[in-house]
Amino acid sequence: MAINNPYAAYQNNSVNTAAPGELTLMLYNGCLKFLHIAKQAMTDKNIELKNTNIQKIQAIINELMVTLDTNVNISANLLSLYEYINRRLSEANIKNDQSILEEIEGLITEFRDTWKQAIQMNRQKQYAGQGGQA
């Protein structure tokens, strides 16, 4: 099946060729994108759009939960935070509470920024290890 939209083709290719760390970064960015849409939908009183986008965020958070490496010590803490985020998203959806979405946005932004920094540090290590090789 050919994709006629070049942007969609680029996005599809980006996801298919991304390293696992970059995929996690994309998931965090997706959460933030859908959070912005949900917040605006809440302001506009567009219940359906708000609900759809909160559900998209929850689906991403669920994906992050099931892909956690349980052999890493921090995984238990992340799992607890992801569960908390999912509970708060449900609350925000039911109560139409934008302040909860802002709280979640802060958490996800922090996750995203930390993850981005970890990727950059990993790249620097890789390049430093290649010292002088072409």
Image: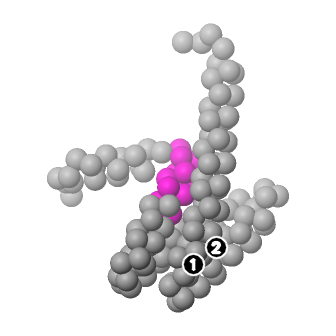
Front residue (pair 89, 128): 89
**Residue visible at 78% across and 65% down in the picture:** 77
Left or right of 58 in this view: 34: left
**Distance from label 2 to label 1 (Cα)?**
6 Å
- The number of discs equals 2
Q: Where residue 6 appears, x then y in whole percent?
A: 22, 47
Front residue (pair 30, 3): 30
Q: Are marks 2 and 1 in contact (CB under 8 Å)?
A: yes
Q: Residue furthest right?
A: 73
Q: Where residue 106 appears, x then y in whole percent?
A: 62, 61
- Residue for badge 2: 85
Dot label at residue 89: 1
Left or right of 100 in this view: 36: left
**Residue visible at 42% across and 50% down in the picture:** 15
Start-end of magenta stretch: 19-31
> Is residue 32 at all visible to an observer of this figure?
yes
Q: Is residue 56 one of those drawn in magenta?
A: no
Question: Which secondary structure, mark 2?
Answer: helix
Q: Is residue 30 one of those drawn in magenta?
A: yes
Q: Quadrant of residue 68?
A: bottom right
- Tell me the crowding category of disc 1: few under 14, some 14 to 19, or many 20 or more residues within 10 angstroms, Cα based: many
Q: Which quarter of the rendered picture does the N terminus lie within?
A: bottom left
Left or right of 92 in this view: 110: right
Q: Where residue 62 appears, x then y in whole percent?
A: 58, 72
Q: Which quarter of the rendered picture does the C terminus lie within?
A: top right
Q: Where residue 111 appears, x then y in whole percent?
A: 64, 55
Q: Is residue 117 above or below residue 112?
A: above
The type of residue carrying mark 1 is Leu
